[in-house]
Image (tube, coloured by chain):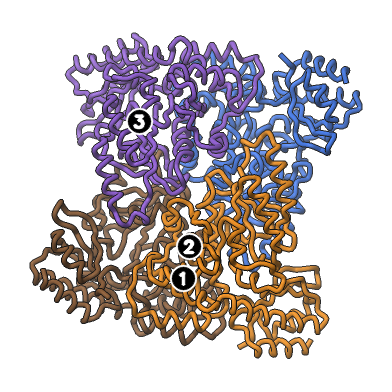
Chain colours: A blue, B purple, C brown, D orange
Amino acid sequence: MKTSFESDYNNGAHPLVLQHLFETNTQQSQSYGFDEWSESARGKIRTACKCPDADIFFLVGGTQANATVIDGMLATYEGVIAVQTAHINVHESGAVEASGHKVITLPSHNGKMSAEDLEAWLKAFHADPTLEHMVIPGMVYITFPTELGSVYSAVEIENILSVCRKYDLRLFIDGARLGYGLASKECDFDLAWLAKHCDAFYIGGTKVGALCGEAVVFPNGNAPRHFMNIVKRHGALLAKSRLAGVQFDALFTENLYLRIAKHAIEMAMKVRQLFADASIPLRDSSTNQQFVELSNKQMEQLLEHILFETWEPIDEHHTLCRFVTSWATTDEDIKALSKALQTL
Amino acid sequence: MKTSFESDYNNGAHPLVLQHLFETNTQQSQSYGFDEWSESARGKIRTACKCPDADIFFLVGGTQANATVIDGMLATYEGVIAVQTAHINVHESGAVEASGHKVITLPSHNGKMSAEDLEAWLKAFHADPTLEHMVIPGMVYITFPTELGSVYSAVEIENILSVCRKYDLRLFIDGARLGYGLASKECDFDLAWLAKHCDAFYIGGTKVGALCGEAVVFPNGNAPRHFMNIVKRHGALLAKSRLAGVQFDALFTENLYLRIAKHAIEMAMKVRQLFADASIPLRDSSTNQQFVELSNKQMEQLLEHILFETWEPIDEHHTLCRFVTSWATTDEDIKALSKALQTL
Amino acid sequence: MKTSFESDYNNGAHPLVLQHLFETNTQQSQSYGFDEWSESARGKIRTACKCPDADIFFLVGGTQANATVIDGMLATYEGVIAVQTAHINVHESGAVEASGHKVITLPSHNGKMSAEDLEAWLKAFHADPTLEHMVIPGMVYITFPTELGSVYSAVEIENILSVCRKYDLRLFIDGARLGYGLASKECDFDLAWLAKHCDAFYIGGTKVGALCGEAVVFPNGNAPRHFMNIVKRHGALLAKSRLAGVQFDALFTENLYLRIAKHAIEMAMKVRQLFADASIPLRDSSTNQQFVELSNKQMEQLLEHILFETWEPIDEHHTLCRFVTSWATTDEDIKALSKALQTL
Amino acid sequence: MKTSFESDYNNGAHPLVLQHLFETNTQQSQSYGFDEWSESARGKIRTACKCPDADIFFLVGGTQANATVIDGMLATYEGVIAVQTAHINVHESGAVEASGHKVITLPSHNGKMSAEDLEAWLKAFHADPTLEHMVIPGMVYITFPTELGSVYSAVEIENILSVCRKYDLRLFIDGARLGYGLASKECDFDLAWLAKHCDAFYIGGTKVGALCGEAVVFPNGNAPRHFMNIVKRHGALLAKSRLAGVQFDALFTENLYLRIAKHAIEMAMKVRQLFADASIPLRDSSTNQQFVELSNKQMEQLLEHILFETWEPIDEHHTLCRFVTSWATTDEDIKALSKALQTL
């Protein structure tokens, strides 16, 4: 079997997560979010976020979490502002629009939104006399880290939040890969800081060691009214909620969530070094996704030994390719990549 | 801890299902439904259904499966016909309407739809000169077994299907508890027969031994065009699809799915016998859900020893209560119930 | 051409309405609701309703008004309670569900909702422990007069409103034929009283002398936030809003609206008398719609001379037929009907 | 009262349209599209389009027509491709998204879509391996003339249509101001040609002489199945359909529709000449909307005498302003503008 750097969801669960599923399996419990492990996990997450009043809901996947939170926090006539490359704009098959909300797009700066772009757009919007014919912006959606592996600084998020407050918009942070952002060497804040600088966010489990599960956090106990009904209406309420609860209980025990992320980042930096050593250009990224500019010939040669994702064509002869690490990436995988690079 | 007959989703996974998750955990795989276990499970289900061309998709939960299939198979202007007590009409927080489709209701006969009611309604509908002002019926939705534990006979399903064919409606069977229906002594058909007598159905995993997962089957390769996009748009596409794939692979190995169901039915019949012995009236049910008419005093006394669900008030002094069995119900549980009944 | 009692929308505009369109045609004006006639009409309606703070919007048609108001006043997860025979439940092609809202149905009592049924349903709903899996009721929808020509008494509406207040539901009254209800001899209240006993209602123009147009009234200035955007989003914002404004300006000048209704009622009572004289049974109705039980033979004979609508079969040999009057019904029409009845 | 060039919907109906409403007012008729004038108008439009099999529906307004046609022609999971400046993307309050469909945007070239941009986007889309996570494009939406007054040439439309055919997309043309496009001197085709080069379009009435009404045309009898129900579901079915029918019957009698458009164009060219004479820069436009670059001082001075719309800021000191003509624009209006320009 080829060594794979295809994604952070091509593997199973971290062994400690799986073990917790195993050791709790025979216990009976409440369902639909009222099981004891969900309750325990909520407590641990509140502590980690330093948000004792946080409302926390465990949903199954990222698209579902995005669609449910956005629909839950917006009025019917409101839209959500995101950058062109945002996951909700490109890779969710229109799940946001399926609930009737427009995704209003701003330019992407290596995956990030700029507070200046945002404010300029809002200023123009509110100066427009035809506002009654337009979609009212109700929320800003950003991803941390972004789809391109970049991370916002604390100042960048503060600036975006400040524009949101000025124009009465909610700020929602998609943390499908949250751990990798927080564990990045570039990141100048922690989980508790993040929780204080948005209106909602989620802690991605699927891509950070779980089999499934995203923990949606409303830091100030500000979950939308009847949010459970909204979750159910989106088909997002797990009957055996223990499945998510047990996994997050494990992930937030002894800092496992961040330990997983740190390991993946360490591996990603080794990947980075290997390409640098081979004089192959890389895009900036301090997280677990590395974007490499391969000639098509290099790409084909590498694919004989290693699995990875082709991201998009750069020009006729070059392709941007993605190499991703996770809890499951080993030193053997790094060696295999190193060896494969030597064949080029 | 009290013995619980609350539900078939208050427990973990059947040990063989969990074991399969364990033994496959370190393997890397494709995602989004293309992993090897999903492929293997699809093969086994096709064999069990004797439908070599079936399209099969693994979704996470029942409400999600219902909403996605119904939305996928209906035109925007079409509605779905169901009985008043149908899960989609009562207990899915409006997930069907969230996609813009009306649930058109017929009377419930112990949870079942009658082909006669259906035909009479359709006849009147098509005779109505204001048809252009109405919701066009596009699908019939039935549950097997029903929410009240009852099962359709082969003839009853044939009759409903025949009305569907006559009026160009699709027939969709919600099989959230499918195993318990097929394992019921009343049931006069098998999985392969069912697959030939509808346009779509799903094999419920969550309530029959899995941690999550429902296998949606389009028996004749008749999945709606771009159904993967529809699944994604509903937030129902698992990134780590192995989670569902591995579990269904286990459930359809050596007939585990039906063995689980048979065990639960056996336990349910023992529950039934205990209440009969105690001269407490029961509703008809040959499946794993038993509905018992307790006086409120009996109910309170029993609840001191045993966990179960209160279903609905019968009159001022009596309550319908539900006792549910599953793979996890043991002879010790039966003994505990027996002992508790003796205290009444 | 046969005399027609088919509907109150098979004619043009009342001559005074048309004349006002004519005499204002060459004036230029603002659009999208800001024209001077819309402003004038709003003033006159506020006076007629004795609601100086009312928010008033002119929409084109009834289904549109219902769908827009219901969607505007409900949260996404809320549904609307109506009787089985309600227009929104039967004859709007699922326009309410198209915005994601469930129509929750109660029994119809000759077209009316009973406050007792409503309270019993709400009581049971709030006692249900699975409330988080259900559609939350947010509004009660009634029609005045009903689709069957019946009218609520002041006490009946007070009782419904009182239940709404108790359970925090909004009350919305569909007044597609409002004039005919207010002009009915049975009616024991007036427009100003009605405006004080609901959260929103509309004054139907299309069926009461206009070519099109319904005046949606939020009596206490309680229009939903950004309601103009909601109207636009529903495709319900007239560019040349003068079309509706001018017509309602005429309808609310010198009491024309009620004068039209009174004329139609007078004619309807003559229709009623004719059938009574012919010993043909009629359903109770004090408004402009009369429902007559004809034998199929009578129906066919009458249809040779007179146009009217067949409503629904009563039994194999009898059909319920509808005869409707309007501003355009004349004494000649009554004579024609009388003559036709003599041929039976 | 100031002379107004604000819009083509700030006036009443063309006198011949109004007269036809007058002379038909006392006749009784069928409703919901089955009246004799709607039928007559459909015949005349079929003749004008040389499409004897065309399906034709009269809707009330433009946003409504767009939302209904787009929703009717798309599958739930499909989106519509339009340029950034398209009316559906900017000025319809999210009416397209309200039905669950994404608006996918391409760059605007003075309001127009380029076939090259379209093909490049589609090529990239179909090369993307994550297609199952994206919105499937189902339709191309263009406006003729565009929101900026520009017109497509026959070759440009042929090229777009050819890309649509290659990628199996439907082509829908928003003709809210269709007459002004066809009457433009730049236009090198006629109505019949247009009808052969798309899958659906509408003939705008509201902005071309009617009080309201848009005629949606499916040239090859290719209306979506149950389109009447779809129209009703969108709240877009006129009860007194005669209102639209009579108006279109007048507009398509003795070529009135095009005569109105030609008059407006003639007036617009005079407006254009006046600004050119005053050495004030204008954007290219051969239709009834003229976009003028005024200094803010000029703008304020002009606004003292003349009403017009400020479109958008050009820079700190200049504003793009819109002057629009219609059937109601007179030589006196032109003189008033001329006089006002002399005061600058």
Residue that numbered label 3 is attached to: B143
Q: Looking at the image, which residue is at 27% across and 41% down?
A: B119
Q: Is residue C166 visible?
A: no
Q: Looking at the image, which residue is at 58% across and 59% down?
A: D93
The reply to whether discs 3 and 1 touch (Cβ–Cβ < 8 Å) is no
Where residue C185 appears, as percent x and y from the top left, is 20, 73
Residue that numbered label 2 is attached to: D56
Tell me, yes or no, whether dots 2 and 3 are on the same chain: no
Q: Earlier in the sequence, mark 1 or mark 2?
A: 1
From this view, report whether residue A88 is shown above or below residue D192.
above
Kindly state the secondary structure of the residue where label 1 is placed: helix
Q: Looking at the image, which residue is at 29% across and 45% down?
A: B122
User: What amino acid is labelled 1 in the image?
Assistant: Ala
Q: Residues within 10 Å of mark 2 (few under 14, many from 20)?
A: many
Q: Residues within 10 Å of mark 1 (few under 14, many from 20)?
A: many
Q: Nearer the viewer, residue B273 or D101?
A: D101
> Between marks 1 and 2, how big is the CA–CA gap?
9 Å
From this view, report whether residue B134 is shown above or below residue C278.
above
Residue that numbered label 1 is attached to: D41
The reply to whether discs 1 and 2 touch (Cβ–Cβ < 8 Å) is yes
Q: Nearer the viewer, residue C94 or D254?
A: D254
Q: Is residue B162 left or right of residue A174?
A: left
Q: Determine the chain carrying the residue at label 3.
A: B
Kindly state the secondary structure of the residue where label 3 is placed: strand
Q: Nearer the viewer, residue A228 or C331?
A: C331
